[in-house]
Image (tube, helix red, strand yellow):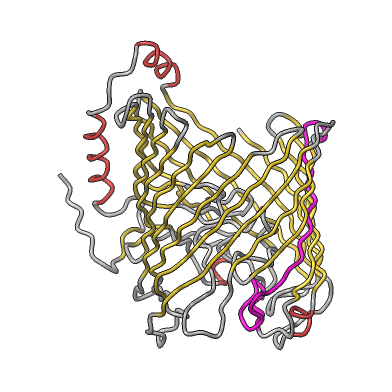
Amino acid sequence: MTHCTAKPASFVRRSLLAKGCFPVSLCLCLAAAGFAPAASAQQAANAAADDGFSIAGSVRARAELLDGQFRAKGPDYEDIALFQTRVEAKYRSGPLTLVGEVMDSRAYGEADNSPVRVGEVNALEPVQYYLDYDLGGALGAGSKTRVRVGQMRMTLGSIRLVNSPRFRNTTNAYLGVRVDRKGSDGSALTAFWTMPTMILPRTPAKVYDNAVEIDRNSLDQQFAGLFYQRPVAGMTIEGYGYYLHEEDSPRYPTKNRNLYTTGTRLMKAPAPGRGDFEFEAMLQFGTAHRSAAPGDTTPRDVWAQAFHGEVGYTFDRPMSPRVALVADYASGQDDSDKITRFDQLYGAIFPDFAPPGLYGPMTRANVFAPGIDLSAKPGKGRVWLTYRLMQVPQPNDLFGRSGIRNGPSHNAGQQIFARARYPLMKNLRFEIGGALLFKGDFLKYAPTTQNRETTRYAYTDLTFTF
């Protein structure tokens, strides 16, 4: 039997499997499977029909353009081409499923000082390789439990804190163990322990060259948590708690974050002819350093908050038009000794704000963004139009991905974003979108501002699936 001898702050993986830990977890999963009750004859027959090998994937080509840079650094104008190819192989035999996925994400045409980084480029990378085992009703009559071991994508709840992006050109992955239990009452519980994947390479020159380098997992960075969801009186309520631990390694200094993030979410899904809503509150505490600089060795208390609120109505009319009032808030760094800037962990900035890539000025930190969302479903397509007023709660702190701080006011500007999606045929989808960012005084007159003009952004892509 292989023994797992993990050392703190040690490098764990550059090959496809964490040294020693994966075989042990695999053995534990198979042992646990022995406690699962036997499936009925009908269940076994249904499972057998799905047994065997399958392969699926997609190819996406995207063009992006940005004019009127909002960042402190970067070209005033830039256009790039992004390509993403993914192939997923799956083998199923009864309760056992084996999955492997390779993704190739590349960018072309970047300027010398382009902001393109690991969110856009991760060439020829094995992003998923895991074993999934169905334990059936082992944890209660009428329940369903699955155990997953290996490197996997992971999305939880609203995806504001845990996400594997679909719009972004690269994805997040997590190496570890995940257990999902669904109860007969509609409840769902997820428990996980992982080592989040660090996308490599990280130097701009190698990113611009689309260099191939296997990503890194390490015990230097661990992410674990619990997520619970259940239906209540036509609504859905969620509660969760996540823990992130990180420490420096010789090549990769960190902020030594030891963060606890807890939250709750209450929502009612949209439906024609009725109102809907979503409210999510997040609280973050623990310790961290202010920066990853080698000389910053002082742990500081963390106390930060974030909130999302949304109230909408879908009309029972052709195209199901929906209108919603929305607001997002996340605390920024104040003048105290504590760290009060919210950390969005592995969460998504889109669709709450705007797409990443060349654009995506807002993140879930130091932001207050009230606005309006409009959407409709013309035929087989979908269209969205959003407006956001961008406010900076702490003007001396960084705003989003701008790299700008110390602005003269709280007003970062106003954003209008629109997109449309339409299936051209069964396996081919077209999407187009764009944004206008009318800069406020914060982005216009801060000391490091380089461009005061309105930011214009556009993208278009084609996605072929097989």
The part of the image, by quadrant, that contains residue 448 is bottom right
Q: Is residue 7 above or below residue 148?
A: below
Q: Is residue 328 left or right of residue 50?
A: right
Residue at screen point 36% across, 41% down: 179
Q: Quadrant of the C terminus?
A: top right
Tell me where residue 192 appears, x and y as whole percent.
Answer: 37, 49
> Viewed as shown, does residue 275 lie left or right of 92?
right
Q: Does the magenta run of residues contain 395?
A: yes
Q: Which of the two residues, 20 or 399, is positioned nearer the viewer here? A: 399
Residue 269: % across, % down:
64, 39
Q: Is residue 370 magenta?
A: no
Q: Is residue 6 left or right of residue 419?
A: left
Q: Residue at x 71, y 88 (%)?
A: 447
User: Foreground residue, 276 or 191?
Assistant: 276
Segment colored magenta: 378-405
Q: Please tell me whether residue 311 is drawn above or below residue 90 in the rendered image.
A: below
Q: Quadrant of the N terminus?
A: top left
Instruction: Indicate the position of residue 48 as horizontal and vertical percent values.
Output: 40, 17
Q: Which residue ends up furthest to the left in the rendered image?
A: 1
Question: Residue at left 72%, top 44%?
Answer: 462
Taking the view exactly as shown, the residue that stands out farthest to the front is 233
Residue nearest the observer in this picture, 167 or 277: 277
Percent from the top left, x then y, of residue 4? 20, 53
